Image: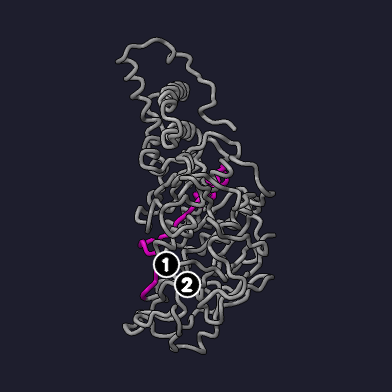
Amino acid sequence: MTDGSQRSPRCTGPAATPVNRRELLERMCTGFGAVSLASLLASEGRAASIADQAARVAPHVAPKAKRVVFLFMNGAPSHVDTFDPKPALKQYEGQQPSGDLYKKSKGTGFLSSPLSFKRHGKSGIEVSESLPNLARIIDDCCVIRSMHTDVPNHEPALIQMHTGNVQPIRPSIGSWVLYGLGTENRNLPGYVVLRPTTKIVVGPALWSNSFLPAEFQATSVVTDDMAVDKLVANIRNPKLNETQQREQVDLLEQLNRLHLARRPGDSELDGQIKSMETAYRMQSQAMDTFDISKEPQSVREMYGDTPFARSCLLARRLLEDGVRFVTGYYVSNNNQPWDTHTSHYESHPKLCADSDKATAALITDLKQRGLLDDTLVIWGGEFGRTPYAENQANKQVGRDHHHTAFSMLLAGGGVRGGLAYGTSDEVGMRAAENPVHVHDLHATILHLLGLNHEKLTFRYSGRDFRLTDVFGKVVTDIIA
């Protein structure tokens, strides 16, 4: 394994010439524009720089996937309106469910879906009419209909889906993957988060490296303005050429290594050093990778012209250029999440139309480029929506949070296509056959990447931690 600390110092040319203090400061200050991105990323806890290409550990099992894109529908889509048809809801329409899952103060009885479901593809998987594009490629997809998580509140459920824990104290799955496998491209961050707004519920805790070394923190990019100089601002140095910048970065690294030698084990300082290296290297590739305007018009039209669609297209470019883990958060044109407590059937079709087109385009695009086989695509939210109604009295019918049964869609990366796995009960209240917990999903994702979730550990505060804590089993039935 090689990293910046093992690279031979290269201080030659003009920088090797003795200079006075004023000249040194003048030269160094002109170089700060080139590394300003690194400083910004690291100081704000958003650095994601890996100086090595070698894997952190050898794969525990033969990997089927090399990279992951998690398309996160924050707010939680309704499973009974997307991938889990429940005709029995019509039979029980208006009847009040019993048990601890029903909130009598808000609920007004079972609510059937007005959306039609049809069987699609050779597999015959039933998909809602609100997802026509995913329906056309359903034979490339696996639908898990028996997902469940621990709590029905957004914040803890979001954190658990991203970190395996309901409190914001553990590393995100993307950080774990990067820690386990390293990066495939030294010129780009290994873990990138695409968010169309800074107002994502919970926020940075969802992509935090926590107690893992700072180099495994995600690089978060706000995609509301897709102009490449806004996405990766301050990446170009206006005065110095590449050779001059290389000399300055090397000199800064030598000084920082001397500083680090007096503070062994300071992962944040080490991450800062490596982030400077990544920022320097990003000049050679980032401006190209992040520029979706270079895509043919036909490709851009295939994805669509919405914030989420543009993020999906950018995600494909990042994956294609060696980024290991990409998370893309969904927010609609009017900043609406999937949290449809009111007017559900006004919002749900609109949200689906946008997400459906872009997600299907990404899967199709990856397949056409020969990347789908070793790229795992995940689509879903933190939980589902209740099979019963909310706010029916005021004619703005909604669906509440629901954590004991929901659906996730996976494609590529060694997953069996054309498979509907597991079931919820007849009305979609609870996971029934082959239940899959979030820990099981995480264990399976790591397995597909060649990592044993029980062996991928990091010792911190006197104990070994892992993404799945003391839980989780690989869902082998969905693996091709």
> Is residue 358 covered in magenta?
no
Q: Which quadrant, please, contains the N terminus?
A: top right
Q: Which residue is mark 1?
A: 338
Is residue 125 visible in the rendered structure shown here?
Answer: yes
Q: How many marks?
A: 2
- Determine whether 19 is above or below 203 in the image: above
Comparing 43 with 227, the one in front is 43
Q: Which residue is mark 2?
A: 78
Q: Position of residue 296 (x, y in %)?
A: 53, 49
Q: Position of residue 253 (x, y in %)?
A: 44, 25
Q: Which quadrant, please, contains the C terminus?
A: bottom right
- Determine whether 216 is above or below 1 in the image: below
Identify the secondary structure beneath mark 2: loop
Q: Tell me what residue is drawn at x 53 percent, y 48 percent.
A: 464
Q: Amino acid at mark 2?
A: Ser
Residues at marks 1 and 2, CA–CA distance in whole angstroms: 8 Å
Q: Tell me what residue is drawn at x 40 percent, y 64 percent.
A: 154
The segment highlighted magenta reads 313-342
What is the crowding at mark 2: few (fewer than 14 residues within 10 Å), some, or many (at least 20)?
many
> Is residue 319 covered in magenta?
yes
CB of mark 1 within 8 Å of CB of mark 2?
A: yes
Q: Position of residue 112 (x, y in %)?
A: 48, 83
Please identify the residue farthest to the front as the structure is shown.
462
Identify the secondary structure beneath mark 1: loop
Q: Amino acid at mark 1?
A: Trp
Q: Position of residue 387 (x, y in %)?
A: 47, 79
Is residue 361 visible in the rendered structure shown here?
Answer: no
Comparing 64 with 55, the one in front is 55
